[in-house]
Image (spheres, rainbow, N blue to C red):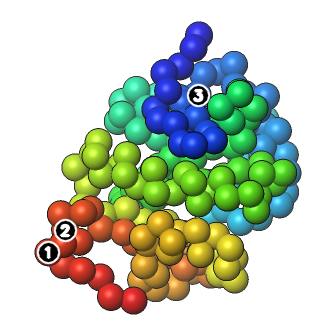
Amino acid sequence: MDTPTIFETERLRVLGFSMSDLPLLKALHADPEVNRHLVPGDEILSDAQAAQRLDDFIHKQERYGFGQWKVETLDGEFVGRAGFLVFEQTSEIALSICLCTKYWGQGYASELAPKLIDWFFENTYYTHLIAFVLAGNEPSRHVMEKAGFTCTKRVLIDGRPYDRLQVLAPAIARRYPMTA
């Protein structure tokens, strides 16, 4: 079953997952380097967990209109996943970009982040969006800051330090600009 395209960038297509994408999701998270940078709970560590998470991605998209989506090149090569997750500790929505390591350093995350932010504020009612970057992961933090996120604080999640970043909805940002 083909899933509809959510949006495209210059080089990428973002579309909903289907259960036939399970081998792609498993392969993405079979790389420990991918999981190492993720917020605890966002990583996928087993085949059973991959199947459950993929099912969750599909049903959350159907229920909420957003979630984690498949990212591929315009010619159909799987790049990773990106979209939005509920950060359970605060019930805030967090942007998440998780790419196969072979695509790191090629500007794909920088291409995705602003489009994801625009999509989010054009299609939801939320006042802000958050993101977490593992402390010391300067390339990822730079991507988020370049897209408009501001670091608000350092937090510990399961004993690991993360920078919590936030971007405000455009209408809120005009009224209450954030300062670095």
What's the residue at 23%, 71% (across, down)?
173
Reading the image, the residue beneath label 2 is 172
For discs 2 and 3, the disc positioned in front in the rendered view: 2
Q: Is residue 96 left or right of residue 25?
A: left
**Residue 95 at x, y percent in the picture:** 48, 57
Q: Is residue 35 left or right of residue 116?
A: right
The disc, 1 or 3, on the residue closer to the chain's N-terminal end is 3
Q: CA distance from mark 2 to mark 3?
A: 32 Å
Indicate the secondary structure of the residue bearing disc 1: helix
Report the amino acid beneath label 1: Arg
Reading the image, the residue beneath label 1 is 175
What's the residue at 54%, 30% (across, down)?
15
Task: Name the quarter where the C terminus is drawn.
Answer: bottom left
Report the amino acid beneath label 2: Ile
**Residue 64 at x, y percent in the picture:** 35, 36
168 versus 7 height, above or below: below
Q: CA distance from mark 1 to mark 3?
A: 37 Å
* Quarter of the figure with residue 176: bottom left
Indicate the secondary structure of the residue bearing disc 2: helix
Q: CA distance from mark 1 to mark 2?
A: 5 Å
Reading the image, the residue beneath label 3 is 17
What's the residue at 76%, 62% (across, down)?
105
96 versus 22 height, above or below: below
Residues tagged 1 and 2 counted as in contact (Cβ below 8 A): yes
Report the amino acid beneath label 3: Phe
Nearer-the-camera pick, 58 or 98: 98
